Amino acid sequence: MDAQNPMEQWSWPPRYDETYRPPSGQRHWFPRRETMPAGERDEAILARIREVMAYAWDHAPFYRRKWEEAGIHPSAIRDLSDFEKVPVVRKEELRADQAAHEPFGSYLAVDPGEVKHVNGTSGTTGRPTAFGISERDWRSVANAHARVMWGMGIRETDTVLVASPLSLYWGSWGAYIGAERLGARVFPFGAGTPGQTARTVMWMKQMGVTVFYGTPSYALHLAEVAADEGVDPADLGLRKLFFSGEPGASVPTIRGRIEAAFDAAVYDSGSMAEVSPWMHLGAANHEPGVFAWQDLVYTEVCDPVDHHRVDYGREGTPVYTTLERTSQPMIRLLSNDLTRWEAPSADRGRTYPFLPQGIYGRIDDMFTVRGENVYPSAIDDVVMAAEGYGGEHRIVISRKSTMDTLAVQVEHRGVAESTLDGWARAIEDKLRRALGVGAHVVPVEYKTFDRTEFKARRVIDDRDLLRRLGSGS
Ligand code: 8LQ
């Protein structure tokens, strides 16, 4: 342990020894930071929050305006409960602020000349948001990601394939610079151009890729394409796959399918690009679920209405605060995602709060059918477990008179025509038990639906269409 730095390179503004790397056999990159009593860490986090808030107050007019309106000054934060009174930041606010203060918004807390990297949201509708990243932040993210990837067991002897789009998407670059900082070999193949997936399979074999990064949907698609090319994905030589961007790696069925297809270990990670290092929700050993690495990005799982922390054991929406970002610090960014958290426990090998089911959905994607809240990922979990599942499905919500109905179109493969009806009814039974509501299962031919190379969009909400046409209620 470094006597000058009792929490191992813990400083504000962040400064890392770029030559540091633990011995290969060591489980933790920073053992003290990762295994210290959670209460002690919380004290350091509180002090850091005060520093980050004071910094934002001085350097980012967006925060000063917002907090003055709310009557809050950084010096008033005396404990972590006080911090819950700081108003959340919504993504719409960031978008509007950037429109008013081009190009990076008035939450940019460094001189514009210090922005050395630009990433952004890849959304095709609405105004995109630009991420202006200083060199210091770029390095902090690289160091954080190296550390979380180290925790997944990735080592300098690995070759890491970045198989998500290498364009505006922060996720790909974050994985790239993390792997590079860790000392691994990085192979930025990307994803998303026609015919690329078959080439990925070929190159993976040639380059001896041992680690895959991308989305869970894409890993499943890659396995399918490999099989079409006559390659058993289990023979590709992968040791590990790690994911971000969408639910899946902590959804048991999806996780199981990926593990089985590639005969490799699966790790979940990811939060939101705005709060990169997004990998702060890195993996726990070989179980589903993720840790909230609180010393990188302080995560509060909150009541979606009052934005106060919910008790451990309860469901809520993550609210994120970056503790190592100086260019566009995020202080209580509301995710509108859903998760459940558990108290830190030394038994898990890291004393961080634990999200046993990962992030299982977005509040916006949740729908209500006959009074029951339904998450698409819960449907995925059931449908993808069915023997004879063909690889894709679509969830269709529509409205008949005043009642919402749920139908799931499921591709089948290798199911005899004469038994299809029974096959569909069996999935319906399982859905009813898992969701508490009935769903109509419609079998469709294998490869009816497009595969995605990025984040899946499986929900078709006909009620939206009705609303847009003005005929819905
Ligand atoms: N989202 C991201 N990671 C997720 C996960 N592990 N489980 C469930 N949902 C997840 C840049 C990083 O890869 C994170 C990322 O995808 O950032 P984006 O593009 O800003 O998207 C953020 C949203 O992806 C989150 O709010 C989650 O809904 C989802």
Image (tube, helix red, strand yellow):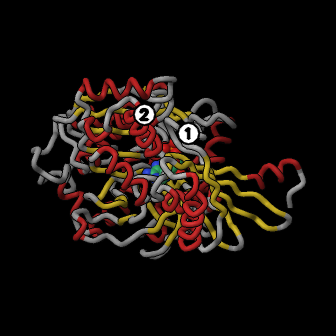
Vertical comparison of 265 with 307: above or below: above
* Residue at 55% across, 58% down: 419
At which x and y percent is residue 124? 64, 34
* Residue at 53% across, 69% down: 430
Residue 462 is left or right of residue 444, and the answer is right
- Disc 2 secondary structure class: helix
Nearer to us in this view, 232 or 414: 414
Vertical comparison of 403 with 93: above or below: below
Within the image, what quadrant is residue 38 found in? bottom left
At which x and y percent is residue 452? 53, 38
- Disc 1 secondary structure class: loop
Instruction: Please name the residue that numbered disc 2 is placed on.
Output: 225
* Residue at 15% across, 41% down: 21
At which x and y percent is residue 421? 61, 60
Vertical comparison of 106 with 199: above or below: below
Q: Which quadrant is home to the N terminus? A: bottom left
Amino acid type indicated by mark 2? Val
The reply to whether residue 15 is visible in this rendering is no
Q: Tell me if mark 1 has few (under 14), some (14-19) or many (20+) residues whose alpha carbon lies within 10 angstroms of its own.
A: some
Is disc 2 in contact with disc 1, using a CB cutoff of under 8 Å? Answer: no
Instruction: Please name the residue that numbered disc 1 is placed on.
Output: 447
The answer to whether the residue bearing label 2 lies less than 8 angstroms from the nearest atom of ligand 1 is no
Amino acid type indicated by mark 1? Lys
**Distance between the Cα atoms at labels 2 and 1?**
12 Å
